[in-house]
Image (cartoon, rainbow, N blue to C red):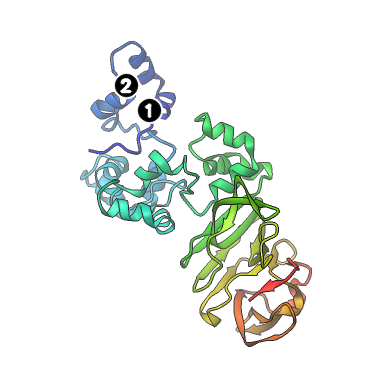
Amino acid sequence: MSFAVFNEDFYLVHHPDVKAAVDAGIFQSGLAHFQQFGLMEGRFQVSPFYDEQFYLQSNPDIIAAVQTGTFKSGLQHFIEFGETEGRRASLLFDEEFYLRKNPDVAVAVASGIFRSGLAHYLEFGRSESRSGTNFNEFGYLQDNSDVAAAVEAGAFGSALEHYIKYGEFESRSGIFSGTDGNDTVIGFGQQDEIYGVDLSPGQCVVGGTPTGGQCLDFYSLGVSEADVLIGGSGQDTFVLGRLQTENKIPPVRSFYVGGGDADLAMIENFEIGKDTLVLGGSLSNYLFNKSDGNLNIFLAANSFSTPLPSPDLVATLKGVTSLREIENSVQFTGGLLSV
């Protein structure tokens, strides 16, 4: 039986009687206690990445199996089957997202090198700045050195754990990003940036020369992607284009350009007067029209105001009916636009 999700320090902190028994030499470790007694005693606090209530609520079939006595708990099911079935066990890790974002890990799991994406993440992924969900771990840690130190010291299992418990209530900004495929990206918190495209660590560039450090870089530009971006109750910034790292040519990119109407961002829960939409280029590059109670946004011209062969749909704002409604909520990156 695999115990990849088990965290020794976490278990002992949440079960002081077990820690006392380990200190007294009655058990060799917290894991030894868990294997012999803890699982059957219903001790579910084994890791920040396992939440018994979340797991059961997410899997009604397992609730039924526990009620009939097939399994002692959701945790027993997760350890024996759920992990390899790709079932999500907490808010802190999304197996399906992780494997889609990291195809190298997906290959390693398929070949049996790792039992699951979660096993890879816990052993290597966190230290490699990989995100376990669409919450961008690297960006949050780069912006919050105190959180990075706390995660490094083991006070938090991940940047997302800090954000859920404290960061979103401290007005710290969260970055939510997707992959180079079709994604549903949901933001939450008081101040969020939401991207459908893939943001991953890349080299910082100053004056056209890599500095050796790491910054967030665009690993996809939305071409051939159909993403759903959903805002939360706070102030959300939906980013559909952005200035690139200093001195890159072209300096501005617009996302979701190149696939016509097939690639776009579908934006939901855009709150007028609170949320912000960021587009690459300037207002003169775009057309806006109403359709079925929504606002469609098309890139229509390049940076020299030369019309494109046909306008390219980049986004649909659900429930917004005119540019006038959001004219104070749209920002443009300016500069030379690449199309």
Residue situated furthest top in the rendering:
24
Give the position of the C terminus as an image quadrant.
bottom right
- Which residue is the site of mark 1? 8
| Image spot of residue 71 (x, y percent) | 23, 43
Amino acid on which disc 1 is placed: Glu
Residue 76 horizontal side relative to residue 127, left or right? left
For the point 55% across and 78% down, the residue is 258
Query: Callout 1 environment at 10 Å: few (<14), some (14 to 19), or many (20+)?
Result: some
For the point 52% across and 32% down, the residue is 152
Secondary structure under tag 1 reads: helix
| Image spot of residue 190 (x, y percent) | 66, 50
Which picture quadrant has residue 165? top right
Residue situated furthest left in the rendering:
70
Give the position of the N terminus as an image quadrant.
top left
Q: Is residue 309 visible?
A: yes
Secondary structure under tag 2 reads: loop
Position of residue 10 relative to residue 84, above or below, is: above
Q: Residue 124 versus residue 261: which sits nearer the camera? A: 124
Position of residue 163 relative to residue 206, above or below, is: above
- Which residue is the site of mark 2? 29
Q: Residue 301 versus residue 148: which sits nearer the camera? A: 301
Say which label, 1 or 2, has the lower sequence index: 1
For the point 67% across and 41% down, the residue is 170
Residue 56 horizontal side relative to residue 13, left or right? left
Which picture quadrant has residue 275? bottom right
* Disc sitting over residue 197 in the figure: none
The answer to whether marks 1 and 2 mark residues whose Cβ atoms lie closer than 8 Å is yes
Q: Is residue 50 visible?
A: no
